[in-house]
Image (spheres, rainbow, N blue to C red):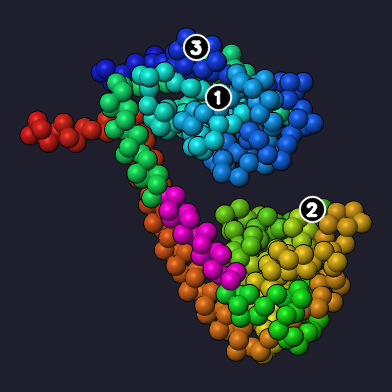
Amino acid sequence: MTVLPDSWMLYTPHDIAGLAKDALVIGPFGSNLKTSDYRDEGVPLIFVKDIREENFSCPRVYVSNAKAAELEAHQVLPGDILITKMGDPPGDVALYDSDVPGLITADCIRLRPTAGFDRKYLVHSLRTPNARRQIDAITTGAAQKKVSLDRFRTRLHISAPPLSEQKRIAAVLDQVDALRTKRREAIDLLDDLAQAIFLEMFGNPVANEREWPVHAFGEVCETRLGKMLDASRQTGMNARPYLRNANVQWFHVDTTDLLEMDFSEADRITYGLAPGDVLICEGGEPGRAAVWRGEVFDCYFQKALHRARPRQGSANPEYIVWLLRMFSILDGLSDHISTATIAHLTGAKLKNLPIPNPPLPMQEEFAWQIRQVEAAKQRHSIHLTVLDELFVSLQQRAFSGTLWDHDREAVAA
């Protein structure tokens, strides 16, 4: 049984919506809204993805005003609360902040609260771990997880204090959330800055705008594909950690989930990693790359990865990774990726990949600038982590009714 703080009450979405029959609705069924109804202008349609991304500023499709009038029961107004009723898992929540009325589509829920509830408070409440657990409990389906409107309407319970305290709680959480958003935006801007630095210094590498000397990748870097895993020959006697495709993300190596296999003494010479090696994905997202910085001692790599070791005086590893990133963004790799079965970048294709190779001092200057950008990103990431922890703490206290305990203690003292 849930123990509520004094003056708090427990509500269902049905209670929050009140008696108005169109205050809590789902999107129209497929037969009522078909792709043939889509238009390039008119009344915007809101999809599950828009709710997940909390972005209603760039509608993808519209319907005519006449069609919108026909589906008026599914209209979305500024300040409405939107919830996804499908996904993995369902239950993403957003406050509709566009000035333009829209229409929800299938697999979306629209909640329009009565006057006794603060909408921002409800959004924060629906995002708590407790609310997510409740939504998980009323979710059905294996291949496609969904929560029905009926279950959402009556089997989800939200605790709330009087309206004035709801507003105070929402204001505090909004303030910290706004700071978190600014940190994320700053990190995104730094990512854009790094890309801009590359283009400013070297131009479009696919078109080789600056007419740098062009060499085959294999002339600039010594390359090797990793060791193939043979499960039948694993003894565990020479087990060592190794990297696979999933560990190599753009610009960083994720070492939180390393596997092990046997590497003989000869293998350890052949497949050893040294700081400054470039690791390149052979499949999955062919060409995805990161610089190995010695994050784990005595670590190796398996067949899903190429190791590219810049030849002495030929290239800077940071430049190589960013070059591959720009090739990926600007469609410079597609002609070199084999797609007979699944997309993959073979050793031969990688070695023969023509790449512009600016003077090494320029590459090293670029690497220095990127290190400054990464240092700034790291500072913002640390601050973001602190804000995330603060938000979770405030969220827990807010919805347990203890957010103002320190004020009460000060008064009592």
Q: Identify the residue position indicated by label 3 in the image.
A: 20
| Image quarter (top left, top right, bottom left or bottom right) of the N terminus | top left
How far is mark 3 from mark 2, CA to CA?
63 Å
Secondary structure under badge 3? loop
Q: Identify the residue position indicated by label 1 in the image.
A: 110
What residue type is disc 1 on? Arg
Q: Residue furthest front?
A: 66
Sequence-first tag of 3 and 2: 3
Secondary structure under badge 2? helix
Residues under numbered marks 1 and 3 in contact, where contact means CB atoms less than 8 Å apart: no
Give residue 409's quadrant in the image: top left
Q: Nearer the viewer, residue 408 or 102?
A: 102
Q: Nearer the viewer, residue 80 or 162?
A: 80
Sequence-first tag of 1 and 3: 3
The residue stretch that appears in magenta: 180-196
Q: Residue at x 51, y 74 (%)?
A: 371
Left or right placement of residue 160 versus residue 255 in this view: left
Asked whether 81 falls inside the magenta stretch, the response is: no
What residue type is disc 2 on? Ala
Left or right placement of residue 301 versus residue 151 in this view: right
Residue 90 seen by the camera: no
What residue type is disc 3 on? Ala
Left or right placement of residue 228 versus residue 308 in this view: right
Q: Residue at x 46, y 64 (%)?
A: 378
Indicate the position of residue 260 as horizontal and vertical percent values. Answer: 67, 57
Q: Identify the residue position indicated by label 2 in the image.
A: 231
Secondary structure under badge 1? strand
Above or below for 142 versus 52: above
Q: Residue at x 57, y 75 (%)?
A: 197
Indicate the position of residue 252 as horizontal and vertical percent values. Answer: 59, 64
Asked whether 184 falls inside the magenta stretch, the response is: yes
